[in-house]
Image: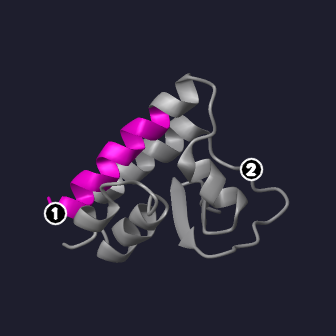
Amino acid sequence: MTNLGEFVLARLAEDEERFRAGELPQLEEAERRGRLRIMYADDAAGLLLAGGPVEAREDRLPAPVAENVEFLRREVCDGHDDTSVKLIASVCETHPDWRAGRRT
């Protein structure tokens, strides 16, 4: 796993902690700002990650935080797509470890 992947996994763990503490997770804030979108696939085969402001169909509900985090962990650990890992990491660009984490 790359340094960037490890960075993202650590931030996902922090998001889980934020959620348990009743705080807004960074992923959810990023979705609200239109930086990325995590949504259920039309065929109910799981979740999809999309970058940028994505308009979701009205009948498409946002996925719960726990499902988002688990889905994104699989994306990072299974090495599906470096672009997805970079997109997830960009949500955490204000974190002090961001500069070191994005180098690889």
Amino acid carrying mark 2 in the image: Leu
Query: Which residue is labeled 2 in the image?
Result: 61
Secondary structure mostly seen in magenta is helix
Q: Secondary structure at mark 1?
A: loop
Whether residue 13 can be seen here:
yes
Q: Nearer the viewer, residue 4 or 95?
A: 95
Q: Earlier in the sequence, mark 2 or mark 1?
A: 1
State left or right for residue 49 relative to residue 11. Answer: right
* Crowd band around label 1 with a 10 angstrom C-alpha radius: few (<14), some (14–19), many (20+): some
Circle number at residue 100: none
Q: Secondary structure at mark 2?
A: loop
Amino acid carrying mark 1 in the image: Thr
Say which residue appears at 22% left-offset and 52% top-offset: 6
Separation (CA) of disc 2 from disc 1: 32 Å
Residue 3, position in %: x, y? Answer: 18, 60
* Crowd band around label 2 with a 10 angstrom C-alpha radius: few (<14), some (14–19), many (20+): few
Mark 2 or mark 1: which is in front?
Answer: 1
Residue 86, position in %: x, y? Answer: 37, 71
Magenta stretch: give its range.
Answer: 1-16
Whether residue 78 can be seen here:
no
Residue 48, position in %: x, y? Answer: 53, 62
Residue 102, position in %: x, y? Answer: 28, 69
Query: Which residue is labeled 1 in the image?
Result: 2
